[in-house]
Amino acid sequence: MDISVTLFGGLRHFLPAGSSFNKCNISVDEGSRLDTLLQQLPIPPEKPYIVIINDEKVSREDYADITIQSVDEIVLLPPIKGG
């Protein structure tokens, strides 16, 4: 199944070739977990980001426990800093 993923800010640099402005489709097997999907993106492990699925923030500890569906809206954001 294909999952649509949106990357914002500097994370857009890690979109696979052939992606549109800030979106890509990633193919995963039915029943795949969020961590499996994220491993297909070439984001360096030291690069921090926030994952939002269907408008809810997901904790990093939960990535391996979340089964993704083709209808899920997955967004990756860089941390927001203020000052």
Image (cartoon, rainbow, N blue to C red):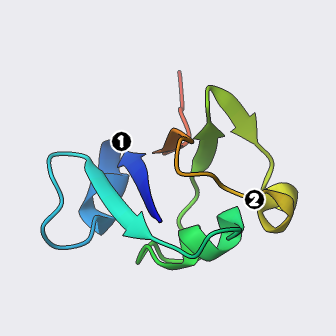
| Residue 42 image position (x, y, % from top left) | 41, 78
Mark 2 is surrounded, within 10 Å at the Cα level, by few (under 14), some (14 to 19) or many (20 or more) other residues, namely some
SS for dot 1: loop
Identify the image quadrant of residue 68: bottom right
Spatial CA distance of label 1 from label 2 is: 23 Å
Circle 1: residue type: Phe
- Neighbourhood count class around disc 1 (C-alpha, 10 Å): few under 14, some 14–19, many 20 upward: some
Residue 78 left/right relative to 17 = right
What is the number of the mark on residue 29? none
Q: Residue furthest top?
A: 83
Whichever of labels 1 and 2 marks the residue nearer the N terminus, that label is 1
Q: Name the residue under label 2.
A: 67
Instruction: Tell me which residue sits at (37%, 48%) in the image.
Output: 7
Q: Position of residue 38 (x, y in %)?
A: 56, 68
Question: Would residue 80 appear left or right of 27 to someone viewing this image?
Answer: right
Q: Is residue 79 left or right of residue 25?
A: right
Q: Which residue is drawn at 49% across and 77% down?
A: 44
All told, the count of numbered labels is 2
Q: Which is nearer the eye, 68 or 5?
A: 68
Q: Nearer the viewer, residue 53 or 59?
A: 53
Q: Where is residue 45 in the image (x, y as percent from the top left)?
A: 58, 77
Q: Is residue 46 visible?
A: no
Kind of residue at disc 2: Thr
Residue beneath disc 1:
8
